Amino acid sequence: MRRILIAIVTFAVLFVAAGGVGTSMLMNHLLTPGGVDWSGANNPNPPTDPYELGYRGDPLTALGLPFETVSYTTELGAAEAWFVPAANMDGPWAIYVHGIGGIRENGYRQLSILNEAGIPTLLITYRNDKGAPSPENAIYSFGVEEWRDLDAAVRWISERGAPSIILAADSMGGGIVGQFLKHSAETDRVVALALDAPALDFTEVAADKIGARMIPLARTLARAGIIAFDTYRKARLNEAISLDAVAKFPGPVFLAHGTADALVPITISKRLIAARQEPTTFLQTKANHLLSFKESPARYRAEMGGFLKSLGS
């Protein structure tokens, strides 16, 4: 019996060690800029619909909205952004934060709703984006490092005249917002959040991908992989958990997420809903990642538009 137990324990240790190394190698591929074409940058036939992910073109070309190309200063250097003015320059302004390997154009769904509500919007780039500086250790860190760029954008838009700020974000952009809420000294400027499939717990994201392949001990392997990745790449993905910070945010939150999301599990948003005490509007769909708008544009517009309207009441 003792030999059997020893064999089981030895197998389990080897399984976790090997699985952790394999998971770390996969993370290195997915989280190194250029490893995966997340934004469709190399698509020879990009979509012509500005509400489709992968569309490329400025706000005037896409939506007929006048805009200004600006830059704001991050700790790594200047980052480019598009500023789209709107009818109510005296009310809150918004900042849109795209997801992993994404582009500013991914925010056109949210921009169209924000602009219709009269809200000026800044669509930013951040480290590792085209139009923004990259650190020497170029990786996506699900907000652990990127929040500093959002922090700089918040300071810039405040100096430009924003009386208060709405943060709109999707996917990893939600993680950036969460880390901003954890660490920034500028959080009192933020009056509301609008999030779509926010990646507020990287460990759960990784574990969900492992579990989807019917591999046992998914969360243990995810943790082991993160430890190996952090050690190898000198990263801090073990800190990429910010659900509590968003749960404690004192302002109202709009949240959209699809049950078929294959990248960021909806369980993260459901945990957030359960932990929230302040007003939260939850649009649950059956969509895959970032496709809740596409499932029903009218419903998405009505829910988010109603949320934005309530901010002025």
Image (cartoon, helix red, strand yellow):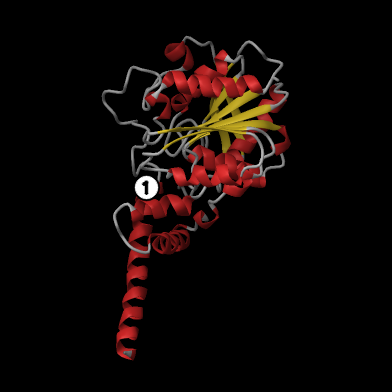
> What is the quadrant of residue 123 in the picture?
top right
Residue at 54% in and 51% down: 241
Q: Residue 97's x, y, as percent? A: 53, 32
Image height check: is 247 above or below 49? below
Q: Quadrant of the C terminus?
A: top right
| Amino acid carrying mark 1 in the image | Leu
**Residue 8 shows in this picture:** yes
Q: Nearer the viewer, residue 130 or 183?
A: 183
Residue at 52% in and 36% down: 126
Q: Residue 117's x, y, as percent? A: 59, 15
Q: Nearer the viewer, residue 53 or 312?
A: 312
Residue at the extreme left? 44
Residue at 32% in and 79% down: 8
Residue at 66% in and 46% down: 183
> What is the quadrant of residue 105 in the picture?
top left
What secondary structure is marked by label 1?
Answer: helix
Q: Which residue is mark 1?
A: 30
